[in-house]
């Protein structure tokens, strides 16, 4: 909308743009977005504060970007809204247009005889010659409500399938739990009839089906059924959380049912309840009034209290994991970490589409959102999705959970095939210490395969994502322990990986972390070095004693990974002080690993080479003292002694003297922000060049040495000031 507005302002002759929403919070949100882009709009947008203010803003000759809610276009008297402007260079942008832009046909109040229309008619009374454009994610095409009939043909369609393909949203999966919580035949028929009548009736005629609604509420909200649903949701959601951390939302038909469901859930899990607004695992969010009976009014929330709960629910780290809603939070409420929605309310068409879209937001390693059905909405969901695909979209935006199960089993076979020839079944019958040994054996086995580490990590990651969607399907529960074992092996492999698979636990995936915790939980304290057959070193991680133990380790591929990781960490630690030396050591390490990966060295040979490199690192720690230099002075010595011609021409003693002088000059001529101020860098460059020339540094190498010295200075910049 913002880009469209900016474009028409450039093209049209000083137009007036009116942006219309139907909620104050949405109006504020959009206004904030536009207000932050005044350069693109070439003007400051204005928010109408009242009907009179709106009329004042639109009775202008040209220009302006005006924000207002549609309710301000309701006439003060009669059934005609006054004409505010007959100009043609007015563009009206309506957001969520499917909700309010109808009512050209007159309605007669049967009690008073008064005639009234809808907002679409009053808006066009006010701005008869304006151009109207609609934005909506769920257009309606029915006899009485038809979005294209009001605004014209679709200009552009970007549906759920496109969004999934582009990675803007995640797929939505569907799981029916009707077999777990059955509804009577009478109940099913009543729901079908109720939905049909609800769809056909106008709002003013809803009283006619009030009795039927009450009967339906009695069936859906029966004590025994609510009890079964509560039990099923608790078990289902706990299993979901074991596989994937996140949030869940329960959609209840009525406020009474929402309260009953809450009561049953907290009976099963008392620890989930809290009277404190800022505590508790589960909350109810719904509208209440002072006249409501006590069981409902006790859940009353002020606007500020609702905001607090909204912030808690949006926070992935907050203990609030589950909410029960009726109508609130089903549209325009984004919680990226929300991954499961339990539906126990009759919904159809755009209302259903808006609701299920709450679970399709992208978040970390979330692979999809899950819709859990307790009422048999599959046909309604299919109908709604088919309409929003037929309007120009493609593919199937919602997938049966069975599809995730099928993918999960396919990925499972890939991982099993990689471990063919390795007996990991014994893992499930072993004690904790033996389990850790088997994980190490499996790790060693994988590392012995060609490109085994990357292939295994990728395969288990794909399996874990499918598993997270499939849980708690019976097929997923069958392989739960096996997946946990594969994930544990993957975790070990990632521990020995530097930077290849992300820097944080969140980036390397958390799909089955809780299951792993349960799979290898123990009361014993197990030392990881001991599990690998190594004694934990007392002083230096690269001591001679430790290196000898690594040489004798049973699992050669694991030994390589241990050494590679430890040496890499040692080098990285040195890089903070001595750039040139650590770079040289890192090149040696990379060269060795490349030879090993290309099978130019055997596992035993590369272990020997790595041990020699470890010893070289240890020996290099003695060099500063031997030269009579501090660690920082030695770092500058390495920077200028990094070429043979300088060593031949100047000799070790003169280079040593030059290093001391360079370090002192650099230290004295650096300021807090010298690394980002070009004039400060230029001054330091001149000082370094003069010093090199003064001490007879080879002229052909001075430029390179100068840049190396400056880079070394940057590496220790924080220590220089």
Image (cartoon, grey):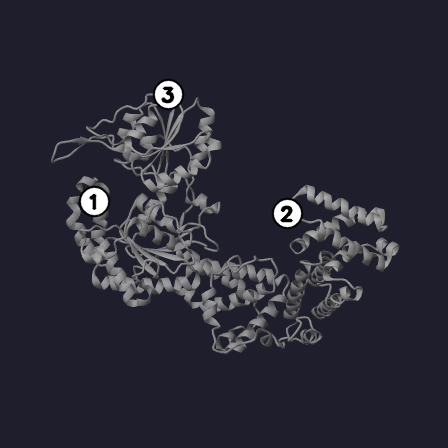
**Residue drawn at the location 26% of the way across and 60% of the way down:** 261
In this picture, residue 165 sits left or right of residue 215: right
Instruction: Provide the residue designation for mark 2.
Output: 673
To which quarter of the image does residue 33 belong? top left
Residue 511 location in percent, x, y?
A: 47, 61
Above or below 395: residue 525: below
Q: Earlier in the sequence, mark 3 or mark 2?
A: 3
Tell me the element at label 1. Answer: helix
Q: Earlier in the sequence, mark 1 or mark 2?
A: 1
In the foreground, 253 or 179: 253
To which quarter of the image does residue 595 belong? bottom right
Residue 311 location in percent, x, y?
A: 38, 52
Residue 162 location in percent, x, y?
A: 45, 43
Marks 1/2: CA–CA distance: 72 Å
**Number of other residues with Cα within 10 Å of mark 2, as a class: few under 14, some 14 to 19, many 20 or more:** few
Instruction: Provide the residue designation for mark 1.
Output: 197
Residue 597 location in percent, x, y?
A: 68, 62
Above or below 174: residue 78: above
In the foreground, 678 or 64: 678
Front label number (3 vs 2): 2
**Residue drawn at the location 37% of the way across and 55% of the way down:** 313
Front label number (3 vs 1): 3
Question: Of the numbered discs in the image, which one, if any, rests on residue 649?
Answer: none
| Figure quadrant of the N terminus | top left
In the foreground, 347 or 621: 621
């Amino acid at each position: 909308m913002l880009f469209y507005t900016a474009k028409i302002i450039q093209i049209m002759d000083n137009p007036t743009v009116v942006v219309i929403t139907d909620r104050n919070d949405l109006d504020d949100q959009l206004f904030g977005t536009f207000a932050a882009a005044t350069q693109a709009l070439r003007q400051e947008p204005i928010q109408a504060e009242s009907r009179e203010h709106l009329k004042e803003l639109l009775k202008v000759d040209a220009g302006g970007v005006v924000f207002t809610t549609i309710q301000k276009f309701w006439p003060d008297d009669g059934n005609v809204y006054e004409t505010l402007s007959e100009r043609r260079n007015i563009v009206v942008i309506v957001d969520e247009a499917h909700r309010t832009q109808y009512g050209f046909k007159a309605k007669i109040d049967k009690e008073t005889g008064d005639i009234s229309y809808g907002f679409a008619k009053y808006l066009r009374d006010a701005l008869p010659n304006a151009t109207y454009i609609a934005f909506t994610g769920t257009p309606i095409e029915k006899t009485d409500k038809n979005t294209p009939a009001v605004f014209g043909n679709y200009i552009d369609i970007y549906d759920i399938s496109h969004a999934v393909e582009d990675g803007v949203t995640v797929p939505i999966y569907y799981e029916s739990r009707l077999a777990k919580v059955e509804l009577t035949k009478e109940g099913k028929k009543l729901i079908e009839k109720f939905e049909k009548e609800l769809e056909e009736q106008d709002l003013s005629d809803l009283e006619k089906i009030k009795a039927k609604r009450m009967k339906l509420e009695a069936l859906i909200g029966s004590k025994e059924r609510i009890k079964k649903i509560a039990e099923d949701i608790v078990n289902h959601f706990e299993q979901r959380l074991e596989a994937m951390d996140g949030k869940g939302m329960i959609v209840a038909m009525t406020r009474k049912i929402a309260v009953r469901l809450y009561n049953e859930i907290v009976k099963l899990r008392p620890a989930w309840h809290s009277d404190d607004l800022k505590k508790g695992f589960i909350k109810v969010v719904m509208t209440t009034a002072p006249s409501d009976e006590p069981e409902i009014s006790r859940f009353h929330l002020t606007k500020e209290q609702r905001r607090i709960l909204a912030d808690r629910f949006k926070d992935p780290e907050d203990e609030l994991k589950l909410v029960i809603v009726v109508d609130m939070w089903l549209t325009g409420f984004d919680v990226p970490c929300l991954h499961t929605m339990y539906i126990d309310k009759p919904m159809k068409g755009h209302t259903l589409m808006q609701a299920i879209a709450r679970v399709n937001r992208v978040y970390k390693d979330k692979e999809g959102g899950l819709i859990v059905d307790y009422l048999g909405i599959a046909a309604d969901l299919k109908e709604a999705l088919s309409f929003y695909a037929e309007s120009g979209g493609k593919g199937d935006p919602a997938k049966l959970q069975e599809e995730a199960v099928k993918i999960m089993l396919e990925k499972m076979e890939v991982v099993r095939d990689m471990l063919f020839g390795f007996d990991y079944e014994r893992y499930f019958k072993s004690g904790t210490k033996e389990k850790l040994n088997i994980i190490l054996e499996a790790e060693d086995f994988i590392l012995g395969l060609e490109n085994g580490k990357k292939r295994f990590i990728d395969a288990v990651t794909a399996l874990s994502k499918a598993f997270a969607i499939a849980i708690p399907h019976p097929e997923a529960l069958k392989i739960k322990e096996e997946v946990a074992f594969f994930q544990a092996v993957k975790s070990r492999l990632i521990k020995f990986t530097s930077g290849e698979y992300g820097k944080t636990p969140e980036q390397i995936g958390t799909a089955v972390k809780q299951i792993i915790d349960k799979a290898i939980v123990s009361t014993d304290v197990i030392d990881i070095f001991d599990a690998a057959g190594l004694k934990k070193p007392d002083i230096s991680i690269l001591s001679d004693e430790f290196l000898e133990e690594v040489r004798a380790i049973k699992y050669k591929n694991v030994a390589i990974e241990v050494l590679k990781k430890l040496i890499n960490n040692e080098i990285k630690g040195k890089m903070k002080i001595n750039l040139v030396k650590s770079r040289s050591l890192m090149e040696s390490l990379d060269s060795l690993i490349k030879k090993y990966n290309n099978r130019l060295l055997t596992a035993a040979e590369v272990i020997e080479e790595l041990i020699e490199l470890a010893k070289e690192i240890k020996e290099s720690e003695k060099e500063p003292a031997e030269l009579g230099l501090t660690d920082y002075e030695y770092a500058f010595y390495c920077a200028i002694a990094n070429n043979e011609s300088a060593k031949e021409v100047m000799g070790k003693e003169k280079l040593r003297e030059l290093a001391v002088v360079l370090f002192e000059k650099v230290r004295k001529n650096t300021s807090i922000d010298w690394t980002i101020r070009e004039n400060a860098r230029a001054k330091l460059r001149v000082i370094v060049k003069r010093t090199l020339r003064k001490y007879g540094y080879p002229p052909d190498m001075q430029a390179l040495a100068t840049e190396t010295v400056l880079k070394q200075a940057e590496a220790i910049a924080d220590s220089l000031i």
